[in-house]
Structures are given as C-alpha cells and as structure tokens.
Amino acid sequence: MGDTALITGVTGVVGYRIAANLAARGGWRVIGLSRSRPADGRRLPGVEYISLDLTDRSACAKTFAGMSGITHFFNAARYEHTTTKPEPVDINTDMFLNVLDAVEAAGHPLRHVHLVQGTKYYGSTVGRFPTPAKESQPRSLHNTFYYTQEDIAIERAKTRDWSWSASRPHGICDPSLDIVRSMARLVGVYAAICKELGLYLSFPGTAENYRAVYQCTDSSHLAKAIVWMSTEIGCANQGFNVTNGDYFRWENLWPQIAEYFGMRCGPVVTIKLANAMSDKGQVWDRIVSSYGLRDIPYAQAANWTYGDFLFTPSWDMMSSTTKLRQFGFPDVVDTEAMFFKLFDALRSERVIPPA
C-alpha cells in the first residue's frame, strides 16, 4: 500500500464516510481515531481503529511515534458540542495541533492535510451573509476554529512538503441509524407524532425560515469530494464549498413531505421544538408499540434542539459550488430525492412507521 490515511473523528458522520470511501477504494491503509472505540455495527472492514484523546498532547505524541507511513491527514474531529453554545475555538485548535505536531515530529511522509469546515466559515450561524457564498469572499468577523486551523495549515505548508485543502459543506445528511442529529429522522419522528395526534403537518419553524433558501450535503457525496480534493494536485492549498449542488425552500418541499407521510400540510406554526416535544414520550412509545418499530428511547428518537437550530434562521443558506466544478468535480445530488430516499431507509429499518 502506497498511501496511509489518518482520520480523526472516525466515529462521526464525516469521518466515518471518509473511512468508508477509502476502504472501498483499496490501495489505502486507513487508520481511524476517536475518543472511544466504535460500536461493532460501526466498525468498517479494512480500517484500523485507535482510541485516543486528541486533547492529550503527550498521548498523541506517543501514539504517532509508534507508527509509520502516514501520508494523508483528514481532520474530521471536533470537540463535543451542542447547537445551543458556540464551539470552543481553543480546544478544537489544540486537538488539530496535537495530532499535526505529533505526526510531523515522528517523521511521517505527510503529503496532504484536509480540514473539514462548513458554511460557518462565512458566518452562517450569526446572521445574513453574502450569498451564494464563494470561497474568495473575505472571512466573517466572528471567531471560529475553522480560521485558526486553516491559518496553521497555510503557514506550515509554506515550509513543508505537504499541501492542504478544506471542504465547506452545509446541512449534512446521512442514513446511519445511530445518528440522532439527523434532519430526515427529525422530520420523520415529528411527522409520526403529529399524525398520531391527528394534527396537520405544520412547519414548526419561523415563517421566514420556511421561505428562505436552504441547501444540504449528502455525506457520501461529501466524502467522495474530500478524497478527490485531497489527492488531486490541482486542488492543493484551496478551500471548496461542497453541497449537493442545488437549493430548495421548505415552503416547496414541506407539502411533498406531508404527502409522503399521508398527511395534510398545515400552516406554519412556530414552536420551540425542545419545549413542545418534551412531553411526547408516551405518544412515541405508543407509536413504537403500534407499528412494531425499533425500541428506540424517546430521548434518542430525535434531537429537538437541532430542529430549533435548523428551523429558526430567517436568512438564506446558499453556497456556490462553481469552483468545485471548475476544478473538476462534476457530481451532484438531487436534494429532494435524497430526502425521500432517507425517509424510505428509516421506514425499512423500522425507525419511523410504514406508509
């Protein structure tokens, strides 16, 4: 094997899909790092798993001193966080540095470092930002570890034999059953509860959010783009927006979702999901029993605070993927078709009720 990939955050959505993509390609040695070992159902054949606390600098140094041959470092790790608090800049920066410093100190033949970022790079979480967001735009005034990590990569690449790249997805969607922070699962569980209660399927967010432009990124599509830009010499030292390549508005998709679930589409009814759904555990238990669904505890059925995070902003979430295509990555994903494929998967796996 000529190339060895080191993937931090391998148990997360993006890290897992990068590992799956590389393992399926063959010709790669794939090493996955995470704080805890993945469950048996999440272990990919052909991937070497190592438990490591990336905040522990000495442990990182010891681990990588005992390895050899790392050529590609995919940084998909991020410190545990919620949607209600800003992600810590210092800890995420230190985690990246601890790994990078250790790999370099151990003399690995590093050729490329990839940074998984997002549209937060453009200030998408703090208010309106220029859309469609382009990679050439000035940075937002807000602080994020995307900037600190990228600055480290930019400066070091000037005097090293390795290059860097960065991917900036938005609204990542994945079919894995153990991913609670899932847009499709959130909507599916919400629809099931509303239907059980005899309600219309009303959009629970703000009216402005219902009408705003939104975008998503299929996780496997993202992983393919990440591997491509990390191995394509023309992409060296560049950042790329990676989304499905299309846009949608909930006001157009929501009636189709209601039809899919056999419900009438109601008007926008703005609620705080974390509060409104907090007492629906017995309703969910009744649904699980009635339809023979997987015995998923209500607390793990859907992430309602994530729903509030998704359905509140009044501004467009819109990135340009022109640069990605100009550099040679042609793939696109139909977002509406993706959602219904995800709903179908949730039904077939008995996570949400059948038709």
Image: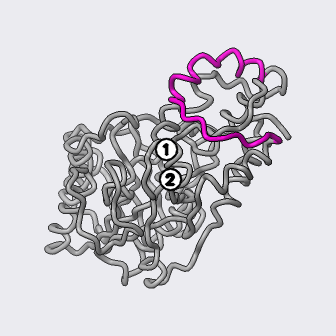
Q: Quadrant of the C terminus?
A: top right
How crowded pointer 2 is (Cα within 10 Å; few <14, some 14-19, many 20+) is rated as some
Marks 2/1: CA distance? 9 Å
Pinpoint residue 179: horizontal percent, then vertical percent: 57, 40
Label pair 2/1, CB-CB below 8 angstroms: yes
Say which quarter of the image contains residue 268. Answer: top right
Q: Is residue 286 above or below residue 303?
A: above
Assess whether residue 270 is covered by the magenta stretch. yes
| Residue 122 percent across, percent down from the top left | 32, 60
- Please name the residue shown 73% across and 54% down the image: 341
- The label nearer to you, 2 versus 1, is 1
Nearest the viewer among 320 and 130 is 130
Q: Judge whether 8 appears above or below 238 on screen.
A: above
Tell me if mark 1 has few (under 14), some (14-19) or many (20+) residues whose alpha carbon lies within 10 angstroms of its own. Answer: some
Q: Secondary structure at mark 2?
A: loop
- Whether the magenta-drawn stretch holds residue 276 is answered as yes
Amino acid identity at mark 2: Gly
What are the residue bounds of the magenta stretch?
Answer: 262-288
Sequence-earlier tag: 2 or 1: 2
Question: Can residue 317 be seen in the rendering of this structure?
Answer: yes
**Is residue 352 rendered to the left or right of residue 278?**
right
Q: Residue at x 65, y 17 (%)?
A: 281
> Where's residue 30, x and y in %?
47, 58
Residue 191: which quarter of the image?
top right
Helix, strand or loop status at disc 1: helix
Name the residue: 65% across, 66% down. 334
Name which residue type carries label 1: Leu
Q: Residue at x 22, y 64 (%)?
A: 153
State the residue position of label 1.
Answer: 310
Between 59 and 172, the one lying in front of the other is 172
* Residue corresponding to mark 2: 171
